[in-house]
Image: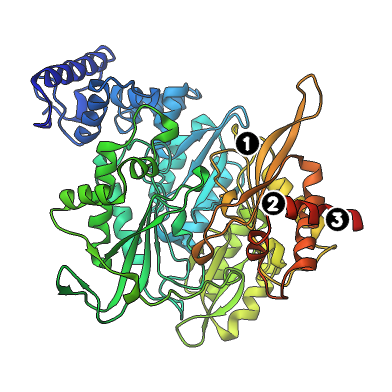
Amino acid sequence: MSDDFTPDQKRYLEGFMSGMQSARTARGLGPLGGTPGTSGSGKPSGPDKEHLEAQATTVAAGGKLAEQEKWKAAEHPFDAYARFKDQANAGLYPKPEDNFRWRYHGLFYVAPAQNSYMCRLRIPNGILKAWQFAGVADLADTLCGPYAHVTTRANLQVREIPAQNAPLLLEGLADLGLTAKGSGADNIRNVTGSATAGIDPHELLDTRPHARAWHHHILNDRSLYGLPRKFNVAFDGAGSIATLEDTNDIGFQAIEVMEGGSFEGAAVEPGIWYRLTLGGITGHKDLARDTGVIVAPSDAVAVADAIVRVFTASGNRTDRAKSRLKYVLDSWGFETFLSAVEEKLGRRLVRLDTAFVQPRPVYDRLAHIGVHPQAQPGLNWVGVALPVGKLTVQQMRAIAAIANSCGDGDIRLTVWQNLLISGVPDDKVEDVVANLQAIGLSAETSILRAGLIACTGATGCKFAAAHTKEDALAIAAHCEPRITLDTPVNIHLTGCHNSCAQHYIGDLGLIGAKVPVSDEGDTVPGYHIFVGGGFGVEGGIGREFRTDVKAEDAPALVEAILRTWQEHRAAPDESFVAFARRHEIAALQALVAQTGEAA
């Protein structure tokens, strides 16, 4: 334990650890830390030492551990796999504490929305092989609902998994060289990277090796599980397609450093570095902020590791609403936090004035859809439009076959809930397009649908207050015959405050709400609507435009908002976010009302 503790505190902490061990022993469990090396005094040791010490410190300071923290201390989820299999073989679903534990294995019991599990995979940088993609389709076909969703973390999730099929699914994924380990609960979630890494003519850096290295670093170090709360890390190589790294706890942004910069009297080598941003959590209305630190790409894993360990020791383990990294940064300030990271690393982090950094390339907001030339001459990536991220198993198998016969065999998932087929020669593009059409998909879509993002919604999530995917498609069906967009617009629908679809960064953002319709407290599904959110150079949190809009009324209101922008923009190329931000909300509401009346 830390030498900063007084003798009384040390005795208190030893008593806390001894009490935890007694509780484990009563359940027939092994020593704390998962190792027989736990000291006789009750002090923690082993791979969970940092977490157990943080819990004990919280209690010693007079704090109360959140229920999830108690569950983690009583039985680590990775020590409980045999018990999970016993439950599954008996056809039993978990009680709350085990529902939390099984999320460490990537399984979420989602009742009452669906009396079954959902499984979220881990796919570093969102890239997997066609044979793996087809293998997931086969598993979904036999063990789950016969479909999959592409998520906003460039990941796959499958649903409607009966209890007895859950272990078969996890072990089937392992047979494919895939895993779901740590994709839920208080862990580092799927590692995102540039969707066009290594093939983009505009990128500064191929993020694949760094995302992959961080992925395997996490998988092979148990001490990186069981954080105060979930944690997101993204690597953006400054390619054509945005990675949304500014929505992550840690964002690594590729930048080009010019000559002339220095740090502590030494010249900073020009070339490609990562800029470090911290604290993104859009559900809490915050984007990651620039720290002033730049990181050599080869050093990214070590820096991320140190950041996570400082967070492990200092994050809030009492109040789940304030247990993310953002709140440590808000409390400590960036410099204090970075000093703690430097102490953990044992060296200084390099700071560089932005005057010595080249402006980053601008994203192409439509590059995730359609045919685009790669850096490799004669080759292309083809962005496939998916209806709010959903794929049938038949479509998955067909896409895998297309990637094998016409591409390089890679399937690249994006944070925009679609996928790319890469390495397609010029003379095979028409074959790809035709084969996609044959399975009900396309490499083309309207500008509106290209930017339409929706979480699972009430159909599959108990937290959601609205059926987001269905309502998103209703918005598209209503608006497309009535208004033609000539500039990209993102419309994000999320079902609850967890903001899985990141509604605050949408040009238009809709968050599910129970809309009152009577004095007796009756409600119907609906939304609160926000305008003017953005990411990257247009980063910002949307402002509330209207509350309590019934779901059935949302399509017409979205149409009126978009029509108002088109009729009142300052110039033909004025973006929606620029238009929304130059108006006060009251003035914008009045304009939209006038447009709606005129229509």
User: Which numbered circle lies on residue 594?
Assistant: 3
From this view, report whether residue 204 is shown above or below residue 35: below
Residue at the spot 32% in from the left edge and 67% down from the top edge: 274
Image quadrant where residue 551 sits = top right
Mark 2 = which residue?
Answer: 585
From this view, report whether residue 466 is shown above or below residue 380: above
- Of mark 1 and mark 3, the one earlier in the sequence is 1
Say whether marks 1 and 3 touch (CB < 8 Å): no
Task: Report the amino acid beneath label 1.
Answer: Ala
Say whether marks 3 and 2 touch (CB < 8 Å): no
- Of mark 3 and mark 2, the one earlier in the sequence is 2
- Of mark 1 and mark 2, the one earlier in the sequence is 1
* Closer to the camera in the image, 215 or 486: 486
Looking at the rendered image, the quarter that the N terminus falls into is top left
Cα separation between marks 1 and 3: 32 Å
- Residue 30 point in image, percent of width and height: 21, 22
Q: Secondary structure at mark 2?
A: helix
Looking at the rendered image, the quarter that the C terminus falls into is bottom right
Q: Secondary structure at mark 3?
A: helix
* Closer to the camera in the image, 524 or 277: 277
Mark 1 = which residue?
Answer: 464
* Closer to the camera in the image, 168 or 283: 283
